[in-house]
Every structure is written in structure tokens, then in C-alpha cells.
């Protein structure tokens, strides 16, 4: 029996999530922007901030990988 600790995720799953997550987030942004409501406007800014944070973490991770 193989231990499950510290196992790397399947590369196919990572590639799949790399495409699905941004598509879902972009769809959510368009959906929230088309609905005129104070709550959806607030959620729109939260989703946009989340996208910016994801991009920043991605850039930081890439720079760290290049430095090693």
C-alpha cells in the first residue's frame, strides 16, 4: 500500500483546473456585471480582487521557480 502523504497532484488535473477556473471566474465577472444590484456590484469587486490576487501569486511563484 502506497502512502498518500506528500503525493503530487495529477498533471492532467492541474492542466484541467488551469483552464476551468479562469473561465468560471470570467463568466462570474460578466454575470455579476450585467446584474444591476448593490450586492452584485460588491461581489463583482470581490471577484476582481480575487483575480488580481491569483495573478500576483502566480507571478511570484513563477519568479521563485526561475530563481531556483
Image (spheres, helix red, strand yellow):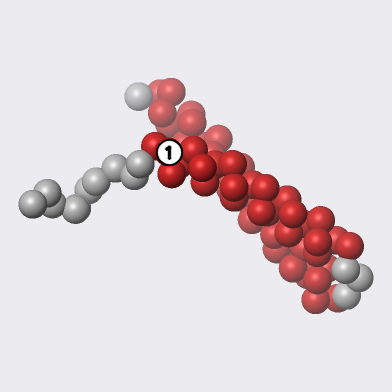
User: Relative to the observer, which residue lies in front, 37 or 68?
Assistant: 37
Q: Residue at x 80, y 76 (%)?
A: 39
Q: Tell me the crowding category of disc 1: few under 14, some 14 to 19, or many 20 or more residues within 10 angstroms, Cα based.
A: few
- Where, by quadrant of the figure, is residue 30 drawn? bottom right
Residue 49 to residue 8: above or below:
below
Horizontally, residue 51 falls left or right of residue 40, namely: left
Location of mark 1 (residue): 12
Q: Quadrant of residue 49?
A: bottom right
- At which x and y percent is residue 41? 83, 68
* Quadrant (top left, top right, bottom left, bottom right) of the C terminus: top left
Left or right of residue 50, residue 30 in this image: right
Whether residue 31 is visible: yes
> On the image, which quarter does residue 29 sit in?
bottom right
Q: Residue at x 73, y 59 (%)?
A: 28
Secondary structure state at the residue bearing disc 1: helix
Instruction: Indicate the position of residue 26 as horizontal and vertical percent values.
Output: 73, 50
Determine the residue positioned at 81% across, 64% down.
Answer: 32
Q: Return the x and y of residue 25 as percentages of the image width and height.
A: 68, 54
Amino acid at each position: 500500500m502506497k502512502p498518500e502523504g506528500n503525493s503530487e497532484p495529477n498533471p492532467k488535473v492541474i492542466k484541467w483546473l488551469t483552464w476551468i477556473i479562469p473561465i468560471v471566474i470570467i463568466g462570474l465577472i460578466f454575470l455579476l456585471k450585467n446584474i444591476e444590484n448593490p450586492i452584485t456590484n460588491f461581489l463583482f469587486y470581490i471577484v476582481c480582487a480575487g483575480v488580481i490576487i491569483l495573478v500576483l501569486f502566480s507571478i511570484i511563484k513563477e519568479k521563485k521557480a526561475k530563481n531556483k
